[in-house]
Image (spheres, rainbow, N blue to C red):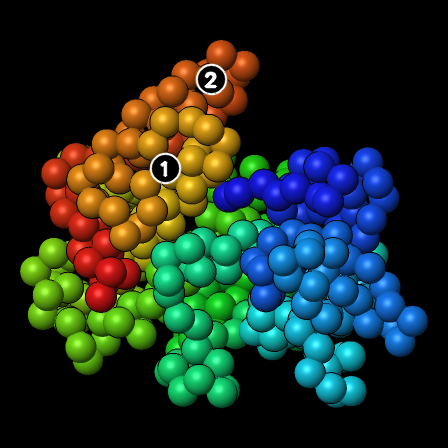
């Protein structure tokens, strides 16, 4: 993740919507791909202040009306004044904003989703939408648990997951206290909003790249996704837990549940890797190979940066930034994902 520069030379960070030095409004400009200061014009439009761009913009409607976004949309006529940006346009359901606290939860969900989209763009990965013909189209639903009409007083739980291009996130994951409780309950090294997005997008790209195209290649690396059936594997995992030797074959305990989850966990770890390397490069640290670089070189840089960052975290009592152990079977699975992304 890179940082940006305002025209006053103040450093800008990805979630900023105002420069704290010159007080300029900011928007991510889709033309120059920078977080840029923007100037409001007499006609109500905005202009990217960078002289080598000067794109004419409107604010994303979720920025203008709800302040949960900070992206601009290229002006293309009167209808675009209510347009959504390339991130928000994938939304199918947003949280109920009449519920106290949901605006803050939505803001945190959108911030994590924008970082997801940044990583997908960095990797050169396409996103299905109604106009580009890529199937299935990608969409997001942010939902809350509701009362179960069959059991008064009991909650009807929303399950975070993916189905045919639709990614559903339970909005309680945007509450730090609840998310940490679940992390401890399930014995997870990490449980983060961006982690949920990167895992579920792995399921999406399995549909795009693997189903009906590379299933035999997938079986050779991850195992047979049809035997046992997913429901049977899920029940067994929650009944028996992961195998005792899971660290010798899988990147996480949950990856051991079923080949689909193994792929999603591995895909999420691959996105973690390229985004960490990108951040390292833009912050002047060692490494920082792009996704198009040698996979082996990327892995070496990632491991070395991970060791250094883990020691920094431990020095102040935080959990490891890179908790994964990259044993040979895990490396081959990451290599499979890398080849899919390259192709």
Q: Which residue is mark 2?
A: 312
Residue at 82 percent across and 59 percent down: it is: 39
* For residue 180, side relative to residue 237 (left or right): right
Q: Secondary structure at mark 2?
A: helix
Residue at 71 percent across and 77 percent down: it is: 75
| Distance from the alpha carbon under mark 1 to that under mark 2 | 18 Å
Q: Which residue is mark 1?
A: 288
Residue at 49 percent across and 12 percent down: it is: 315
The reply to whether the C-beta atoms of the residues labelled 1 and 2 are less than 8 Å apart is no
Q: x%, y% of residue 222?
A: 16, 57
* For residue 320, side relative to residue 147 (left or right): left
Foreground residue, 105 or 134? 134
Residue 98 can be seen, yes or no: no
Crowding at mark 1 (Cα within 10 Å: few <14, some 14-19, many 20+): many
Q: x%, y% of residue 223?
A: 13, 59
Query: Within the image, what quadrant is residue 327 found in?
Result: top left
Nearer to us: label 1 or label 2: 1
- The single residue placed furthest to the front in the displayed view is 51
Q: Decide which of tag 1 and tag 2 comes sooner along the chain.
A: 1
Mark identifier at residue 49: none
- Say above or below: 272 vs 100: above
**Quadrant that contains the C terminus:** bottom left
- Say above or below: 212 vs 282: below
Foreground residue, 184 or 261? 261
């Amino acid at each position: 993740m890179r940082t940006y520069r305002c025209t006053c030379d103040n450093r800008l960070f990805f979630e900023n919507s105002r420069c704290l030095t010159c007080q300029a409004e900011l928007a991510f400009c889709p033309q120059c791909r920078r977080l840029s200061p923007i100037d409001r014009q007499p006609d109500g439009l905005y202009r990217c202040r960078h002289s080598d761009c000067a794109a004419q913009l409107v604010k994303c409607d979720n920025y203008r009306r709800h302040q949960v976004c900070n992206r601009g949309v290229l002006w293309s006529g009167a209808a675009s004044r209510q347009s959504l940006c390339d991130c928000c346009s994938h939304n199918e359901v947003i949280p109920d904003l009449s519920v106290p606290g949901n605006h803050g939860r939505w803001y945190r969900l959108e911030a994590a989703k924008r970082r997801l989209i940044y990583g997908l763009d960095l990797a050169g990965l396409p996103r299905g939408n109604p106009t580009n013909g890529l199937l299935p189209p990608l969409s997001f639903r942010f939902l809350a648990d509701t009362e179960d009409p069959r059991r008064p007083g009991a909650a009807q739980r929303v399950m975070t997951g993916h189905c045919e291009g639709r990614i559903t996130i339970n909005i309680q994951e945007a509450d730090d206290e609840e998310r940490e409780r679940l992390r401890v309950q399930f014995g997870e090294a990490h449980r983060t909003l961006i982690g949920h997005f990167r895992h579920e997008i792995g399921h999406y790209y399995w549909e795009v790249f693997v189903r009906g195209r590379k299933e035999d290649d997938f079986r050779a690396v991850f195992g047979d996704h049809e035997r046992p059936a997913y429901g049977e594997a899920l029940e067994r995992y929650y009944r028996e837990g992961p195998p005792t030797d899971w660290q010798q074959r899988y990147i996480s305990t949950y990856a051991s549940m079923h080949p689909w989850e193994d792929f999603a966990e591995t895909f999420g770890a691959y996105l973690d890797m390229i985004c960490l390397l990108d951040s390292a490069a833009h912050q002047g640290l060692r490494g920082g190979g792009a996704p198009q670089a040698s996979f082996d070189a990327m892995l070496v840089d990632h491991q070395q940066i991970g060791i250094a960052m883990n020691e920094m975290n431990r020095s102040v009592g935080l959990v490891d930034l890179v908790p994964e152990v990259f044993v040979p079977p895990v490396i081959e699975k990451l290599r499979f994902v890398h080849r899919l992304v390259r192709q």
